[in-house]
Amino acid sequence: MTELELRDLRKTYAARGRPAVDAVRGIDLALRSGELLGLLGPSGCGKSTTLRMIAGLESVTGGDILVGGSSVIARPAQQRNIGVAFENYALYPPLTVAENLAFGLKARKRAARGDVDRKVREIADRVDLTPLLDARPTGLSSGQKQRVSLARALIREPDVLLLDEPLSHLDAAQRDTTRRELKRIQRDLGHTTILVTHDQEEALSLADRIAVMKDGVIQQLGTPYEIYDSP
Ligand code: ADP
Ligand code: ADP
């Protein structure tokens, strides 16, 4: 079953007094339920813009976005059931890590207090955040913040998960652990996922398929084997 579909998706940034930028120039893509797509391409090719449009954090110039068969274009971000872990997706400084995670959950459903606490502990354990639950985001390293963002996206149990370079600030050991954990979460929970990465190894080890973007369009689409082993 197709869970996420992009139809001729387009974005032109137009600001007064500046030339318009065609950041995304017609993307067609269908992800089946539970699939993880690795999205690669040089800086400036339109990867983040694509993710932000899917998440509802950026308006769409043309085309359509369907989740579970329904267009979500007209829905605000909080009604899309899409989890995002973006580099500069702010955590709330006044709240502890645990409260930041609980907030992500409460924003979506009115969960009972005990359930919220249990879920927070469960997800913190999965991404190795348990010792940091009472810390505040400002005191954390960028790698730790990155894991909080990831946990906050996952805790919402979204239909679709959008990850923008989720492992980029981690050291080699943490990257290995988190990558393995992501794979297990993906297998256990079956999110339909788009993961933006510069790291070929990350794409190879995690992705079911890889899309290579250039200048606002998808240039190549296939399995990691087809993308990396083709002559
Ligand atoms: P990537 O994530 O692949 O690096 P982006 O989606 O960030 O690419 O950017 C695609 C193009 O759109 C680039 O030319 C970038 O400069 C431009 N762009 C991104 N955000 C904005 C914005 N808010 N206003 C104007 N242009 C933008
Ligand atoms: P609100 O206070 O309106 O619930 P926030 O201030 O938390 O929302 O965030 C701004 C927007 O981003 C909201 O539309 C919210 O639903 C959405 N959002 C917040 N956290 C996430 C997340 N982890 N994944 C996806 N969307 C999120």
Image: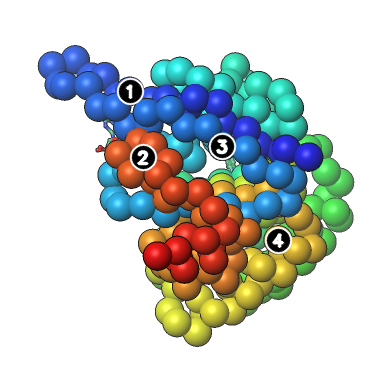
Considering only order in the chain, which callout, 4 or 1, is on the residue closer to the N terminus?
A: 1
Quadrant of res 148: bottom right
Circle 1 residue: 12
Q: Is mark 2 within 8 Å of ligand 1?
A: yes
Looking at the picture, does residue 173 appear above or below residue 112? below
Q: Which mark is on residue 119?
A: none
Considering only order in the chain, which callout, 2 or 3, is on the residue closer to the N terminus?
A: 3
Q: Quick one: which residue is furthest to the bottom in this view? A: 173
Q: Position of residue 49 (x, y in %)?
A: 40, 36
Circle 3 residue: 29
The quadrant of the image that shows the C terminus is bottom left
Residue at figure coordinates x 63%, y 54% from the top left: 36
Residue type highlighted by circle 3: Leu
* Residue 110 can be seen in this image: yes
What is the secondary structure assignment of the residue under circle 4? Answer: helix
Q: Label 1 vs label 3: CA separation? A: 19 Å
What is the secondary structure assignment of the residue under circle 2? Answer: loop
Considering only order in the chain, which callout, 3 or 1, is on the residue closer to the N terminus?
A: 1
Q: Do the numbered discs 1 and 3 sit on residues whose CB atoms are within 8 Å?
A: no
Q: How many numbered badges does the structure rendering display?
A: 4
Residue type highlighted by circle 4: Gln
Which residue is at the front of the view, 44 or 152? 44
Residue at figure coordinates x 45%, y 63% from the top left: 230
Q: Label 1 vs label 4: CA separation? A: 33 Å
Q: Do the numbered discs 3 and 4 sit on residues whose CB atoms are within 8 Å?
A: no
Q: Which mark is on residue 46?
A: 2
Looking at the picture, does residue 111 appear above or below residue 10? below
Circle 4 residue: 186
